[in-house]
Amino acid sequence: MSAASRLWRRAPLWRFSLYSCIFFLVLAAFFPTPRLLHLLPWLSRLPGSTAHHPASQGGPNPPTAPDGQNQAGNNNNEPLSADRVGAPDINASFTGGIPFGGHTLPLPAGTWHPVLSGQIGPDGAMLVNIMVRTDRGIVTGVMIARTNAKPLPAQGVDAIENPCHDDRNFSSHIASEGNNGVLECWRISRATLNNGTVSSDDLIRMAFERLHTLGFPVPSVFIVTSWVRAAKAQDGGVTTAGVDTLLAPVQPGTVQLLAPLPYWEKNTVTQAPAAQRFVLATQQWMANWSGVLRSGLTAGLPAGIAPLDLSVDPAAPRL
């Protein structure tokens, strides 16, 4: 009798461990984590794998439409009709920029994945796209983009820049305050994860619920860059665009903050050098990136992608 056969007969715990390894390998193949899919993308092509069928990944329930109408969820890649929100295949990857509302939505450095997209509001007038960026399976950025599919009434548009005057912001910049019919500003603020989300907004809450459902670790704090623009249209209405980019101030490949949680506020950030450096770097990046957003969402970008030298934000994955 060989040594292997004697071990097989006399070591039931070893046999059980071997069977368990095979069982859990099969489970991992058919129910891969986002990190495993990143390392072994071919797993998504296995028949029967949950990654092979994005609709089975448990997309969030749709929110209530602003005009009181019901919205239908869309967990496949069919075109979105008015007042509908969908959960696209999160395994799809984009870099540089994507088409958005007839223009180009510039993407910061790294690979971005769609979380939610759709049209909301009366007659589906507002286009929304929420995307996520990860590094080694950890969320390093979330982008929330909005633009209107057709000109909106001018009433209330003046309030679009009110958040830029919030004294809780780390900084803000008014690019245009009505000059030539254009309102434009950007600001740097912070968002804290609370009850699994960073906002009470239904769409943002749904997006973060989907990230949690799919197993993405999400940091407890984000530094947020917010850019908004409104311009008068020829028919007397107003076209608007806004992009919020949530940047994770964490150690690479982890959810550990660069500084303890209390130091990510305006009145305490100077007491933690790592936090202050991240916020200052974000301000410097946004001073240039705001121009890229303006070009992409108004005039267009060469080849439809953001300039590489301007796209590297402080939370971008380092090669």
Image (spheres, rainbow, N blue to C red):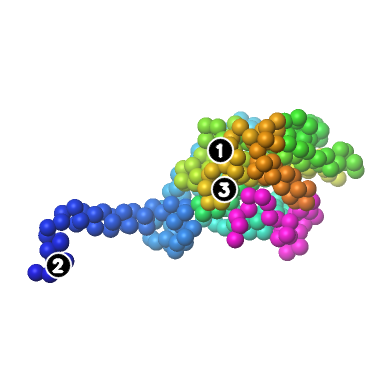
Count of marks placed on residues: 3
Element on which disc 1 rests: loop
In this rendering, position of residue 47 left or right of residue 8: right
Visible residue check, residue 104 = yes
Residue at the extreme right of the image, as rendered: 180
Estimate the x, y position of residue 214 in percent, counting from the top left: 47, 46
Residue at x 73%, y 59% (from the top left corner): 309
Estimate the x, y position of residue 144 in percent, counting from the top left: 65, 44
Q: Identity of the amino acid at label 2?
A: Ala
Dot 3 and dot 2 residues touching (CB under 8 Å): no
Residue at x 43%, y 48% (from the top left corner): 56
CA–CA distance in space, label 3 to label 1: 13 Å
Residue at the extreme left of the image, as rendered: 1
Residue beneath disc 2 = 3
Numbered circle sitting on residue 220: 1
Q: Identity of the amino acid at label 1?
A: Ser
Residue beneath disc 3 = 251
Mark 2, Cα crowd under 10 Å, few <14 / some 14-19 / many 20+, is few
Estimate the x, y position of residue 53 in percent, counting from the top left: 44, 54
In this rendering, position of residue 109 left or right of residue 28: right
The mark nearer the N terminus, 3 or 2, is: 2
In this rendering, position of residue 86 left or right of residue 6: right
Residue at x 60%, y 43% (from the top left corner): 258
> Bounds of the magenta span?
291-319
CA–CA distance in space, label 3 to label 2: 48 Å
In this rendering, position of residue 44 left or right of residue 103: left
Given residues 308 and 112, the one toward you in this image is 308
